[in-house]
Image: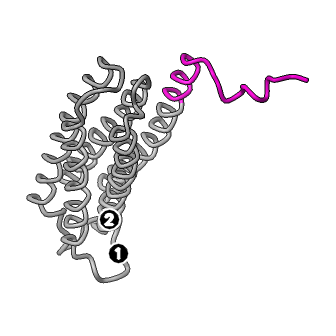
Amino acid sequence: MSTSLEHVHELEPHIRVGGARAAVIMFILSDALSVLAILAAGGYLNSLNTESQFKVAGDHPPAFLPGLLVAIALVLSGLSYYWWERRARENEGTGQAAFFIVALVFVFLALVGQIWVNMSLGYTTTPFHAYESVLMLITWFTWVHFLLLTIIGLLLLGRVLRGRLAGHGYIAEVTGYWWYYTVLSSLLLWLFSLVI
């Protein structure tokens, strides 16, 4: 009787690392296409602007201050995660979790701040014009990314606090790929929402 089925879950470490990296990179690439589609659609509608219907009188961009605070929280989160992730990879997943907790707190603050941005749009009359639709898509799309990053961060926090990251430093690395991508894509979408 073959025991290959019994040992299928015991993959070589380099295969697990490669699989994790590939999965996260493919997820990022698919999401980046969504971001590019939003940017292309918004830019196209803005440049086309047939009969001045894209942006009508009374339309306004998202409030600047909440967006700026969210952007600052994101940058601080990315930097905190970077510092923690470098330490975690050097120590094979062991060490202090303070920078990671700070990064997670900043992501949660960005999530709450993005709700503030969404509510401050004040688009209440339907049907929504194209400009309003693009801005609502950008703000809620970004909020979903923050929510996903918060969930991923909480799951990783559970591993860190239980010491289950030891020997699995690649988990911090591949989580970092998504963390940094979320920060960069959200900043890009925020800047786009200001200039559109």
Residue 9 on the magenta span: yes
Q: At which x and y percent is residue 98?
A: 19, 38
Quadrant of the drawing holding the N terminus: top right
Position in image of residue 85 (x %, y %): 28, 28
Instruction: Please give the name of the residue rendered at 30% of the width and 19% of the height, measured from the top-left corner.
Output: 91
Residue closer to the observer: 167 or 119: 167
In the image shown, does 11 or 53 lie closer to the viewer?
11
- According to the picture, the residue beneath numbered tag 1 turns out to be 128
How packed mark 1 is, by other alpha carbons closer than 10 Å (few <14, some 14-19, many 20 or more), is few
Residue 168 falls in image quadrant: top left
Residue 35, relative to residue 124: is it above or below? above
Mark linked to residue 21: none
Q: Amino acid at mark 2?
A: Met
Residue 6 image position (x, y, % from top left): 76, 29
Question: Residue at the location (19% across, 51% down)?
Answer: 195
Q: Which residues are magenta?
A: 1-22
User: Is 20 inside the magenta-drawn segment?
Assistant: yes
- Residue for point 30% across, 35% down: 180
Which residue lies under the disc numbered 2? 136
Task: Pick whichever of labels 1 and 2 is earlier in the sequence.
Answer: 1
> What colour scheme has been applied to the protein in the rendered image?
one colour
Question: Residue 115: x and y, percent?
Answer: 25, 65
Q: Secondary structure at mark 1?
A: loop
Does the residue at mark 1 contact the one at mark 2 (Cβ under 8 Å)? yes
Mark 1 residue type? Phe
Asked if 97 appears above or below 123 in the picture, the reply is above
